[in-house]
Amino acid sequence: MTQKNKFLCVSILFFFISNLVYSQGQETAEKYKKSYKDGNYTVSEVEILALITEYETNPDSILVYANILIEKAQTYESKKESLRAYRSGYLAKGHALQSKGENSKAIKAYLKSLDYANQAKNKRAIAYLHIPIADTYTIMENHENAGKYYEKGIRLLREEKDNLNLAIALLNAGDRLITLGEYDKALSYFSESSQLYEALNFKLGLAYNYGNIGIVYAEQGLHSLAEENINKAMIILEELEDYYPMSVYLTYLADIYSDKGDFERAFKYGERSLELSKRYGLKEQISDANLKLSQLHESSGNYDKAFDYYQTHIKYRDSFRNIKEVQKISNAMTSKKEAELEVEKEKRKTQRIILWSTVGVSVLIALLAFSLFKTNRIVKAANKTIAKEKERSDELLLNILPEDTAQELKDKGKVEAKKYPEVTVLFSDFKGFTSYAENLLPEQLVETIDHYFSNFDFIMEKHGLEKIKTIGDAYMAVGGLTFDSDNHQAQDMILAAKEMNAFVKQVQQDSQTSAAFDIRIGINTGSVVAGVVGTKKFAYDIWGDAVNVASRMESNSEPGRINISESTYQCIKDDFECEYRGELDVKNRGRLKMYFVKD
């Protein structure tokens, strides 16, 4: 994939991860599947099937349930329910086919979903559906159709005042215009998208806009403006710890300037990309940056350095390909040359012993039959051995990573980080635990903390929330690792926090020892990046300003209280009674508004 195509795919991916629902644990999808098979669900059949397609990460499995939705649609008496099933089924089918690279089939599925949205007169769905259609046409380089669907989708999204999807549509439409060289129109799209992202306080989208504006200025030869906007993007992306697009932008700029013959600037951006990739251990980007520098040195006539960089590129390219396909079994049959020699030998033998020709032919047939039988046994044994080794490899991978993440690693050779525009993060901590733990045996310490955390895990699972990790006596969880605009993750997190408090108080009442603690809880709502880190011991984690603020909410809380930020308060104020604490000083954050959730 060329760097320019890679840049476009990064931007298109931004649309999909900002609008589609991807599960962060296959267990969630499996839970919905079990509920559906057992008939044990409280929502409608269309809704439970749609939830399965939203949480499932295996495209083939998504297709199965998408087809069930489409088949079920024919059986519903309610026209509204039938149209919803058709629309949801074909939308899920389009997403699955697009992720498998079957873009033409994906377009057909999206168009059918759009047709049912039109029949239902669902204006918001109609507006939204134009954008994945346009994005898929863009990936297929069918720019005429992509342009038509972008223009209509943008107009409809404006009418619906769907500002988030409008901003994303403008960003992706602008990316397409860059590839077509329509820089002025691209800049106008990016300008409008930037204003929308600023109003939404969506930093990730704003960073992509700055980066794309910088690309346009670089293409136009406006170096200072290009540098200024790229640096703005870098500051935000570094704050969000989203290093992958930073490296792509820098390597893309190196491409632009090398094409223009400005090798001084090209080397500058290529080396900056390599330095950034090394700093954050991004193996794929280290590989790309080394390849770009190798090409630049080759163009400059410095073949020794070009070779050195190329060798490093190969080293890192191989290292991030974690999963390799099992090699095909080599042909166990005799080679053509050996077969021809054998036939010639038999011919001479037949000529010398004409009287024994019939016997000779019979013996030859028997030998060939035995040879085929033996060869078949060897092939079967080899297949069986390879299957066992593959099964062992799969089991080992599943012991390290969640099933959906492991599947992505096997399918793509890597796990891509995903960005979530709105999640709710919880931190909790026990008061006085450190001094208490100093006087405990290791076995007692583990037993005590496990008692609390096991129950916290049950509470999180009950409310459909995700535990991320524990550090000592600190517990971290998150809700909203989906892109479903109808979810109530902030409310669910408050309910879970209340149950955590109730459990801790119950332990205090029942306990006859000093192993009873007070708990502080802090909650914040905002955007995060989620993904897998590590090369030997993989771990799933989330990063972003929302995580840091949630931690500050916990440290500024009080025992037995739930301290929430302004952003969380705005999400739950109609459902829970809260006590305004005022603006409190927070380390490295200045003054922040805080609220206690009342019992």
Image (cartoon, grey):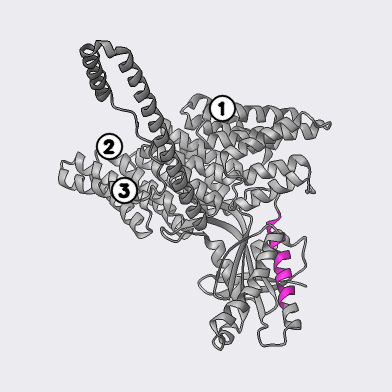
The image quarter in which residue 110 lies: top right
Q: Give yes or no for residue 582 being in the magenta stretch.
A: no
Q: Which residues are magenta?
A: 488-504
Q: How many marks?
A: 3
Q: CA distance from mark 2 to mark 1?
A: 38 Å
The quadrant the C terminus occupies is bottom right
Q: Earlier in the sequence, mark 2 or mark 1?
A: 1
Q: Is residue 44 above or below residue 86?
A: below
Horizontally, residue 570 falls left or right of residue 236, namely right
The quadrant the N terminus occupies is top left
Q: Earlier in the sequence, mark 3 or mark 2?
A: 2
Give the labeled residue for mark 3. 289
Residue 126 visible to an observer of this rendering: no
Give the labeled residue for mark 1. 105
Around disc 3, counting alpha carbons within 10 Å, would you say few (fewer than 14), some (14 to 19), or many (20 or more)? many
Give the labeled residue for mark 2. 260
Secondary structure under the numbered disc 1 in the rendered image: helix
Q: CA distance from mark 3 to mark 2?
A: 19 Å
| Pointer 2 with pointer 1, Cβ within 8 A | no
Three-letter amino acid code of the residue under disc 2: Lys
The residue at the point 57 percent across, 67 percent down is: 549
Secondary structure under the numbered disc 2 in the rendered image: loop
Secondary structure under the numbered disc 3 in the rendered image: helix
Three-letter amino acid code of the residue under disc 1: Lys
> How far from the left and from the top, in percent, is residue 251?
34, 46
Q: Give yes or no for residue 489 being in the magenta stretch.
A: yes
Q: Is residue 391 above or below residue 9?
A: below
